[in-house]
Image (cartoon, grey):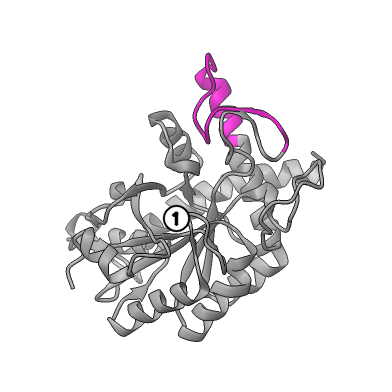
Amino acid sequence: MGKSKILLFFCVLISTILVLVTPYKALAETDEVKVDLEDIEIQPVKVPILMYHHISDKPQNIAMVTVEKFRKDMEYLKENGYQPIFFDELYEYLQGYVELPEKPILITFDDGYQSNYNLAYPIMESLEMKFTISVIGWSVGRNTFIDSDVPITPHFSWEEAKVMYDSGLVDFQNHTYDLHSPKGKSYGAQLPVETGVLPMEEESFLDYRIRLSKDLLTLAIEMYENIGRLPNIMCYPYGVSTENSERILKTLGYIGSLKTTPGIRTYSSVSDLWEMPRINVDNYTKLETLLLKYKEIE
């Protein structure tokens, strides 16, 4: 890592903490905006979080949908008054600084597949709807593994991510740089790993903290360099996490994390942003059915 990279590494770390934690305190202390944070009463809000991955003409598992199914899902949301938001908006609402629409919803994609750019983005652009993509760092812009010509499902490039981010309709979050792998060797650099972000057997907390922090900051640096975004939500690979992974994320300035646990949460405070449940959307179940299943009240 060159001097400029090292400098940027520490700048990103410090900026992440300062940018994500201090603005609200500073805002409350200004003469122009006099806010007594203790007097703010936040009304609990139920926010479904939808989970998509890849759009394919031939769905092969529950993580894939056709473009027709995705379009119908989004049209259903639009026609029924749902308004997509970003995680930053939910965080700011829970701090008492912004209002949310009457029927907020979060739409997420995991991994960063090319279909997110080629197929999902044009639909969302035409409907003027927001969504969030959590990317795997090493696979950005690739259609093969790093050290071989073995194909992988193509992923969009940073240039394409910048187009989406600059539109104001797409946000980006952290799905790890190279920890989205089963136990053994990581898919990217072939490093020893447990499943996802889990600590390895006999790994000390210090070693685990260094390994996880390095991975997350590597992706944060690349994301900042390429699109100008510092991620502040962690999307756990395979939905697995530990108490220590949550502690580490908080020290890095993250404001929340995403799981694959099914459900819809009612959010009352910023503490509810950790280990958020989501609804996996498959190709065969109507979105209306899924929302009703998890007790979303129309």
Looking at the rendered structure, the secondary structure element under dot 1 is: loop
The kind of residue tagged 1 is Ile
Would you say residue 220 sits in the magenta stretch? no
Residue drawn at 37 percent across, 55 percent down: 25
Tell me where residue 209 sits by quadrant: top right
Q: Is residue 37 visible?
A: yes
Circle 1 Cα neighbour tier, 10 Å, few/some/many (<14 / 14–19 / ≥20):
some
Q: Is residue 180 above or below residue 264?
A: above
Image spot of residue 158 (x, y percent): 70, 62
Task: Identify the magenta region.
Answer: 189-213
Q: Is residue 246 left or right of residue 124?
A: left
The picture places residue 10, in percent across and down from the top left corner, at: 65, 42
**Residue 98 appears in the figure:** no
| Residue 182: % across, % down | 56, 34
Q: Is residue 207 magenta?
A: yes
Most extreme residue toward the top, as rendered? 202
Q: Is residue 148 left or right of residue 259?
A: right
Q: Quadrant of the N terminus?
A: top right
Q: Which residue is mark 1?
A: 62
- Toward the viewer: 189 or 169? 189
Query: What residue is rendered at 52% in x and 34% in y?
Result: 197
Residue 242: name its quadrant.
Answer: top left
Image side of residue 70 versus residue 83, left or right: right
Does residue 139 lie above or below 71 as drawn?
Answer: above
Which residue appears at 52% of the width and 65% of the height? 171
> What residue is rendered at 61% in x and 50% in y?
136
Name the quadrant of the C terminus: bottom left
The picture places residue 46, in percent across and down from the top left corner, at 23, 62
Is 22 drawn above or below residue 183 in the view shown?
below
